[in-house]
Image (cartoon, grey):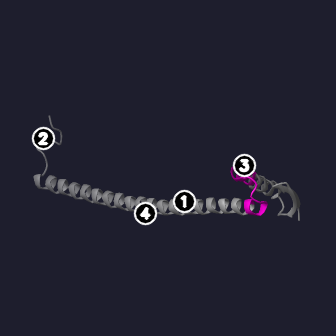
Amino acid sequence: MPQVTVTIAGKTYRMACGEGEERHLEGLAASFDSRIGDMRKAFGEIGDMRLHVMAALTLADELAETKRRMEAMERETASLRESTDAGSAEREASEARLAETVQRTAERIERLARRLGPVPGGAQGG
């Protein structure tokens, strides 16, 4: 199992990770380290543990907000799919009604033509 060495808030940690996950883990550690650095600038030296907890809670809050947004987008996507499906069904029904109307009109024209009988002098008009 691969291992990486990361530095967070000036402390070095050796961690195991899955094959091919090394860069991802290093990036996560760098992001967390950066967050702690930003908080240290904003709040001063309030203790490493408190900074780590605050940074973790900030990231957890961002994750929770991202999940809420994803769920809202999933609901919106489902609603749009339903609307699209309903629109498709309505369009198909309209097309079926139109085809039926065209068929009935063609049948009426044929009945009228049979009633009128053959046109004297051929079928050409002038």
Q: Which residue is mark 3?
A: 41
Which amino acid, mark 1?
Arg
Residue 83 screen position, x and y as percent: 40, 60
Which badge, 1 or 4, is on the more N-terminal residue? 1
Q: Quadrant of the N terminus?
A: bottom right
| Residue at mark 3 to residue at mark 1: CA–CA distance | 30 Å
Nearest the eye: 64 or 23 = 64
| Residue at mark 4 to residue at mark 3: CA–CA distance | 49 Å
Magenta stretch holds residue 36: yes
| Residue at mark 1 to residue at mark 2: CA–CA distance | 77 Å
> Dot 1: few (<14), some (14–19), or many (≥20) neighbours within 10 Å?
few
Q: Nearer the viewer, mark 4 or mark 3?
A: 3
> Dot 2: few (<14), some (14–19), or many (≥20) neighbours within 10 Å?
few
Nearest the eye: 113 or 118 = 113
| Residue at mark 2 to residue at mark 4: CA–CA distance | 59 Å
Image quadrant where residue 18 sits: bottom right
Lateral position of residue 111 relative to residue 51, left or right: left
Which amino acid, mark 3?
Lys
Q: Circle 2 sits in a helix, a strand or a loop, which is it?
A: loop
Q: Nearer the viewer, mark 2 or mark 4?
A: 4
Which badge, 3 or 2, is on the more N-terminal residue? 3
Question: What number is the disc on residue 82?
Answer: 4
Region rendered in magenta: 34-51
Which badge, 2 or 4, is on the more N-terminal residue? 4
Q: Which residue is mark 1?
A: 69
Q: Circle 1 sits in a helix, a strand or a loop, which is it?
A: helix
Question: What number is the disc on residue 121?
Answer: 2
Q: Circle 4 sits in a helix, a strand or a loop, which is it?
A: helix
| Residue at mark 3 to residue at mark 2: CA–CA distance | 102 Å
| Residue at mark 1 to residue at mark 4: CA–CA distance | 20 Å
Question: What number is the disc on residue 125?
Answer: none
